[in-house]
Amino acid sequence: ANNGDYRPDGSTRTATEQHPFHLHGHRFWVLGQGFGPYNPANATLNLENPVYRDTMTLLANAWAVIRFKANNPGMWPFHCHIIWHHMMGQQLVFLEGIKQWPKQPKGFPKCPKTCVFNTNPYTYSYVQQRWGYTGYQLPLP
């Protein structure tokens, strides 16, 4: 996890605060952490006795490398535990063992083509009014 947001053009912004990241459905090993952008050529990873967690703090202006066993089929969120960071997009979902998932129940509503997620009250204007510019702005409507 590189402490910033990734954009389609490859550029990133670096966060200036720490983020407690949590993985659902698993515990993970923290293999390494460091400051600045992640560079595998300079990163030192602990493959012998890394710490084992379900939540870790990603420090300001830093990166972390984690490892987990993908042995629990499901949709598992990995997200910042600061709720409005989570609501504003600091999360991803690992889709694991898709072929082992049960079939969708008959009559169950179908998922839309795009994600619909209610982020109230964390709208662009609410965040702007309450905290000002944070570096993690919601896209304008």
Image: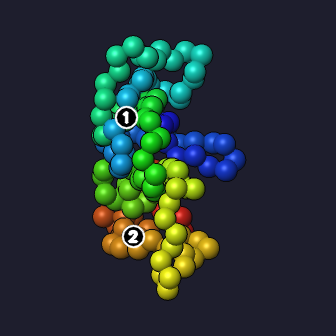
| Local SS, label 2 | loop
Mark 1 or mark 2, which has the lower sequence index?
1
Near-viewer residue (44 or 51) = 51
Q: For the point 57% across and 21% down, which residue is it?
A: 40
In the picture, measured across the screen, residue 87 lies left or right of residue 12, that is left
Contact? badges 1 and 2 (CB < 8 Å):
no
Image coordinates for residue 17, horizontal then vertical, percent = 35, 40
Image coordinates for residue 79, horizontal then vertical, percent = 39, 50
| The disc label shown at residue 28, or none | 1
How far apart are the alpha carbons under marks 1 and 2?
Answer: 28 Å
| The disc label shown at residue 119, or none | 2
Image coordinates for residue 129, horizontal then vertical, percent = 34, 67
Near-viewer residue (108 or 123) = 108
| The disc label shown at residue 136, or none | none
On the image, which quarter does residue 112 sit in? bottom right
Q: Split into 4 quadrants, where in the image is the C terminus?
A: bottom right
Q: Is residue 80 visible?
A: no
When the figure is inspected, residue 63 is found, relative to residue 85, above or below; the finding is above
Q: Residue furthest bottom?
A: 107
Q: Is residue 135 visible?
A: yes
Q: For the point 37% across and 34% down, which residue is it?
A: 28
> Which amino acid does the dot numbered 2 rest on?
Thr
Badge 2: how crowded within 10 Å, few (<14), some, or many (20+)? some
| Local SS, label 1 | strand
Q: For the point 50% across and 82% down, which residue is it?
A: 106
Image coordinates for residue 26, horizontal then vertical, percent = 36, 43
Of labels 1 and 2, the one closer to you? 1
When the figure is inspected, residue 71 is found, relative to residue 83, above or below; the finding is above
On the image, which quarter does residue 22 sit in? top left
When the figure is inspected, residue 9 is found, relative to residue 89, above or below; the finding is above
On the image, which quarter does residue 133 sit in? bottom left
Q: For the point 57% across and 56% down, which residue is it?
A: 99
